[in-house]
């Protein structure tokens, strides 16, 4: 493997309860917002998001790997669904 | 009269009330989170539990309950308030106490008996202790790691707001005794004036030898002395 | 609408059962009716295989206030207090989604208790997993424990005891049993008997979603994955806490005449139960049931297993008061129907009839089966296999002890119970790790209760009838070791497929064993639960009849722990049984063999040993006590030594021809280690004991070694090994 | 207020620990990914994401409200920072 092509990526993995799955936290937050007077809010879903820094040869490769991580560890496929986005990290941001 | 404030999902309210009435002999009653007239109370306990199911952050939603605004005024006037566990979390969320409580370092809820060393007596709730006294109290929480940035921590130290730290049975402060990963082993902090105290361990569960210990009497009865003096 | 041919198989009804239904109804069932029959005639609700067997249980005693049949059993604890308790399984859901499965298991059993009008004061749990060298098993273990803690901690009910056991037979089918204990006044016990035609049926608590459709049906077949065709249930302990408080407040008035939680088979079983128990009819309209999801059908509403819901039967004039209280707890209340006098369960879908069936057809008419029973010959062979391992040298006693203390099955359970809040409610007088049973005070009285949950699955596999007797004996003995008198028990029958001769053999023999032990030991069965089909790819779980015993101690300050004081002398109270190696932890964990006949038990002698200990304790002649079971004398003594943080010195006379490993690590029933301060030891020695009971002095707790004959193990080393037994095996899990 | 202009929006509020605040969950996940062989991952941050459905007259109005919710309730400024995005919800998606 050559390092030349490899570069740094930031994958954002977003995990939410599947449609139909009970989301008690979202409901409690909805109630809380209601108490605070945000009556315009009709629904809240509570999820988790992971920012994963990784090296990969290309955006596609980074996406493939991040997808696998999401499947294997970051989400629970029985009750959750996930989505993944990838962006390059420039060296100064790191 | 001591008010024990109950939020939806509070579950340590019963223990606080029972401890105050039956073990300490203090007059106490529940105060509903919707109540806004607090005139009849001399002190408040915010008990442990899972207010609003710990949704979002522990204490984040309870902090906006109707009772909280008059409670903040009560605090402002120097009235004694004790926040235990979830009550501590509510008080930090409400900015009546500094810092925040993060998830335990282990990422797990844990329940066991700990030792804490009392470092400050100059407040409503530890005035009955001796300087350096070691209390054995149970903890039961998933998010008890006290956090504040370094500047804030230095200030808290300087102001004498760090009231107790986790320690070994002999009083030494070690990483091993700091099971939840609190900054500087902090187990209890007060506000600047010393009338509001928050702590993660449960003094109200330790006011009777039959259930494991009575060191909590020192804290639960403190306000009583304070009130007697004050009245 | 007609039923497609074979559609009944989708709800796990046999062809024959379907034809029976058609005959009983005199017509084809409507689709909703078919689904309801599938649920009500499942093993889970209908007890098809277990009902005939369970009839053999003794269920009565003067102190039994409520036997099996209601949501939970109840006994008299004195001072007008009733103790309400039950154990229940959530095995299949936990196999699919361990955290939520275990959490909702706790939610379900807690609802059973407050449905009876009792305030829940304690939770116990009994868990079984495959070995922790598998990542999947570590995941299941970690998340099941997390789920039990997550739910119970949030409710503010302490989890005070339990047990965990690992064996490859649980690889595909972990077992998650949860027990809850509540307290109320005798005259405040609530029942789930619908009464008074015209009374209003209300549902309160959570909205109904598509969770766990047909859970009851599919927990009654072999494939756990199939057990959830709908959406997996996610528990909401916060809502349950509100529901708990609302229900207990409602029961202080007399507007509510019956209460029934919505558990397995949700609205179907709760409606049917309320009608059939009360000998009345019930009519509801699913259009009135608050939904979480749009577009739900009547079928889905009736089959949903959404958690945290409760069905109430309310006097018409009380409906507004009920609504006011429920809403004050931030919950929804909906009137969905009323009680009728025609014995029918009638379900309307926006006025249109979706079900109209006499309640008794769902319950009493459910067929029961007695199957052919025959033991699996492999198990017969295992039991009859001669023990061929070499005996150990005197010097090897120490390392063998360390191997056992460090095994997943005998190591410290601290990593488990530290994740449970066991101090909340401030009743825990003896908590986990301090004694064989948990002891709780009953505030406002001098009394306490003691409770333990137990089952030696290995014994039950090798000999289900004998193993089941041991389960009752050991759970009772654990209660006795805390100084309390055992009064009654609950049980959860976790078995494989009863339709197979080998499965039915295990189930039927075990039930017979439980029944006999209950009779002889005087602990009637007041509640229980059955979980069959714990079997995947032909591998059934070890038969696991979990037994939970509750006892009462009149003066809770007199409770015993297993923690002796330095200097205490110790004795073995026993019935003269020589320890044997058959089915022992020593053979299994040190030699990898589950073979041989488990130790025989004489239940009369067991009863004599138990009452002898209580007598000695009543005379103030016991400073600590500990049941001597798995791992034998050596492990029991080491347990006490570790609990006390004090070494021990013990000598054992090994007779000619006796095996050394059997003497130290062999197992025998009816043995209790007791300690006493030296100044009282003479009184123990001269105490009068029943003829069948013996007392043998073994040594003293002192120093910082666990000294077993010639072998000495530093206490600190034993502690390290013991404390890390679960952690090292479970890695990061 | 007229309903004519009002429409449905989905606000996504993302909350992460501030720099300097411990993120034991992120660290545990990094460790877990390492054990699973994802050696290319150098850092993981664990955050929360909330999907809030609300009505508002415009995207700007929705953003303003969602920002206020995030400030007031959905994040704790002592330990967290947040960002908000808003998108319209078409009626068929609801
Ligand atoms: N799953 C569990 N939950 C809570 N406590 C448990 C659990 N498993 C074991 N314990 C507690 O740990 C202690 C030791 O359990 P165990 O090794 O099964 O004891 P013994 O073999 O003496 O019956 C007991 O206090 C028991 O209640
Ligand atoms: Mg046991």
Image (spheres, coloured by chain):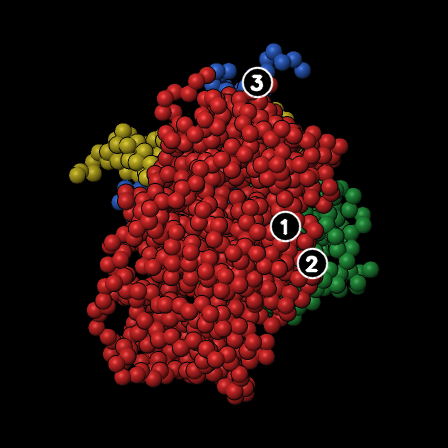
Chain colours: A yellow, B green, C red, D blue
Give the side of residue C439 with respect to residue B25, left or right.
Answer: left
Q: Percent x, y for residue C619?
A: 59, 79
Dots 3, 2 in contact, CB < 8 A? no
Quarter location, residue C439: bottom right
Please name the residue shown 60% across and 51% down the image.
C66
Give the number of the disc on residue C19.
none
Residues marked 1 and 2, same chain: yes
Please name the residue shown 59% across and 76% down the image.
C618
Q: Percent x, y for residue C688?
A: 53, 83
Residue at image mark 3: C352
Dots 1, 2 in contact, CB < 8 A? no
Between the C-alphas of marks 3 and 2, the distance is 48 Å
The number of callouts visible is 3
- Circle 2 packing at 10 Å, graded few (<14), some (14-19), many (20+), is few
Relative to C582, say whether B35 is above or below: above
Residue at image mark 2: C80
Relative to C479, say whether C34 is above or below: above
């Amino acid at each position: 493997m050559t390092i030349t092509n490899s570069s740094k990526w930031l994958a954002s993995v977003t995990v939410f309860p599947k449609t139909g799955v009970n989301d008690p936290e979202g409901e409690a937050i909805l109630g809380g917002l209601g108490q605070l007077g945000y009556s315009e809010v009709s629904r809240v879903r509570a999820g988790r998001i992971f920012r994963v820094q990784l090296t990969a040869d290309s955006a596609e490769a980074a996406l493939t790997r991040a997808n696998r991580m999401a499947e294997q560890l970051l989400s629970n496929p029985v009750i959750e669904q996930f989505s993944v986005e990838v962006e390059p990290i420039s060296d100064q941001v790191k | 009269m001591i008010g024990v404030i109950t939020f939806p999902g509070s579950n340590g309210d019963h223990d606080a009330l029972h401890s105050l009435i039956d073990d300490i002999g203090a007059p106490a009653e529940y105060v509903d989170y919707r109540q806004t007239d607090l005139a009849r109370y001399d002190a408040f306990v915010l008990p442990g539990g899972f207010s609003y199911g710990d949704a979002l952050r522990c204490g984040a939603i309870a902090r906006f309950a109707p009772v909280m605004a008059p409670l903040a005024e009560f605090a402002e006037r120097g009235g004694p308030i004790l926040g235990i566990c979830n009550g501590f979390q509510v008080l930090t969320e409400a900015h009546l106490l500094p810092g925040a409580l993060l998830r335990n370092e282990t990422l797990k809820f844990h329940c066991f008996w700990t030792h804490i060393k009392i470092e400050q007596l100059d407040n409503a709730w530890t005035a009955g202790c001796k300087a350096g006294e070691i209390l054995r109290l149970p903890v039961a929480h998933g998010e008890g790691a006290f956090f504040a940035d370094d500047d804030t921590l230095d200030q808290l130290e300087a102001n004498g707001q760090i009231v107790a730290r986790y320690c070994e049975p002999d009083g030494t402060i070690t990483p091993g005794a700091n099971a939840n990963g609190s900054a500087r082993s902090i187990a209890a902090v007060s506000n600047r004036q010393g009338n509001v105290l928050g702590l993660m361990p449960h003094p109200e569960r330790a006011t009777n030898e039959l259930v494991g210990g009575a060191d909590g009497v020192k804290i639960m009865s403190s306000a009583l002395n304070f009130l007697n003096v004050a009245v | 609408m007609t039923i497609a041919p074979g559609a009944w198989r989708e709800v796990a009804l046999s062809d024959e059962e379907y034809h029976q239904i058609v005959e009983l109804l005199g017509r084809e069932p409507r689709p909703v009716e078919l689904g309801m029959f599938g649920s009500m005639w499942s093993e889970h609700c209908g007890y098809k295989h277990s009902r005939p067997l369970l009839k053999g249980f003794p269920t009565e005693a003067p102190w039994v206030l409520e036997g099996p049949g209601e949501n939970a059993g109840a006994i008299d604890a004195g001072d007008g207090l009733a103790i309400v308790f039950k154990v229940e399984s959530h095995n299949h859901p936990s196999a699919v989604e361990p955290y939520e499965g275990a959490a909702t298991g706790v939610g379900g059993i807690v609802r059973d208790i407050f449905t009876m009008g009792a305030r829940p004061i304690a939770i116990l749990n009994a868990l079984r997993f495959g070995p922790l060298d598998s990542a999947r098993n570590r995941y299941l273990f970690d998340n099941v424990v997390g789920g039990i803690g997550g739910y119970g901690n949030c409710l503010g009910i302490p989890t005070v005891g339990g047990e965990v056991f690992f064996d490859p037979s649980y690889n595909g089918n972990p077992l998650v049993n949860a027990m809850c204990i509540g307290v109320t006044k005798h005259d405040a016990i609530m029942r789930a008997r619908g009464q008074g035609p015209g009374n209003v049926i209300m549902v309160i608590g959570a909205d109904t979603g598509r969770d766990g459709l047909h859970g009851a049906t599919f927990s009654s077949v072999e494939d756990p994955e199939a057990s959830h065709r709908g959406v997996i249930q996610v528990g909401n302990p916060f809502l349950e806490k509100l529901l708990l408080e609302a229900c207990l407040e409602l029961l202080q008035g007399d507007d509510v005449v019956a209460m029934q939680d919505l558990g397995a088979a949700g609205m179907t079983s709760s409606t049917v139960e309320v009608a059939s128990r009360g000998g009345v009819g019930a009519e509801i309209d699913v259009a009135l049931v608050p939904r979480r999801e749009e577009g739900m059908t009547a079928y889905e509403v009736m089959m949903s297993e959404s958690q945290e819901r409760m069905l109430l039967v309310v006097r018409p004039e009380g409906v507004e008061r009920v609504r006011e209280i429920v809403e004050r707890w931030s919950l929804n209340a909906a009137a969905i129907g009323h009680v009728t006098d025609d014995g029918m369960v009638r379900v309307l879908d926006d006025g249109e009839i979706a079900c109209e069936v006499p309640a008794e057809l769902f319950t009493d008419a459910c067929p029961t089966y007695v199957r052919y029973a025959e033991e699996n010959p492999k198990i017969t062979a295992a039991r009859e296999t001669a023990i061929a391992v070499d005996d150990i040298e005197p010097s090897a006693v120490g390392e063998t002890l360390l191997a056992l203390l460090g095994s997943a099955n005998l190591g410290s359970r601290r990593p488990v119970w530290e994740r449970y809040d066991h101090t909340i409610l401030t009743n825990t007088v003896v908590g986990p790790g301090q004694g064989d049973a948990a002891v709780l005070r009953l505030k406002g009285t001098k009394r306490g209760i003691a409770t333990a949950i137990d089952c030696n699955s290995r014994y039950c596999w090798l000999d289900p009838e004998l193993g089941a007797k041991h389960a009752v004996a050991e759970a009772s003995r654990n209660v006795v070791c805390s100084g309390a008198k055992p009064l009654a028990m609950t049980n959860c029958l976790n078995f494989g497929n009863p339709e197979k001769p080998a499965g039915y053999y295990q189930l039927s023999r075990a039930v017979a064993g439980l029944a006999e032990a209950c009779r002889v030991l005087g602990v009637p069965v007041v509640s229980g639960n059955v979980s069959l089909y714990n079997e995947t790819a032909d591998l059934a779980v070890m038969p696991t009849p979990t037994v939970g015993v509750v006892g009462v101690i009149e003066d809770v300050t007199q409770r015993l722990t297993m923690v002796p004081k330095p200097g205490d002398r110790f004795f073995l109270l026993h019935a003269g049984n020589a320890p044997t190696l058959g089915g022992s932890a020593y053979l299994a964990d040190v030699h990898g063999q589950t073979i041989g006949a488990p130790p025989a038990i004489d239940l009369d002698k067991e009863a004599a040993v138990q009452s002898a200990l209580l007598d000695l304790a009543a005379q103030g002649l016991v400073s600590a006590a500990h049941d001597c079971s798995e791992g034998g004398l050596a492990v029991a003594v080491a347990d006490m030594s570790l609990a006390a943080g004090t070494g021990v010195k013990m000598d054992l006379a090994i007779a000619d021809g006796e095996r050394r490993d059997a003497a130290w690590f062999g197992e025998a029933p009816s043995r209790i280690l007791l300690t006493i301060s030296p100044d009282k030891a003479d009184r123990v020695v001269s105490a009068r004991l029943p003829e069948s009971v013996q007392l043998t002095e073994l040594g003293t707790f002192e120093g910082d070694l666990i000294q077993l004959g010639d072998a000495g193990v530093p206490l600190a080393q034993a502690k390290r090994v013991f404390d890390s037994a679960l952690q090292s095996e479970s890695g990061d899990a």
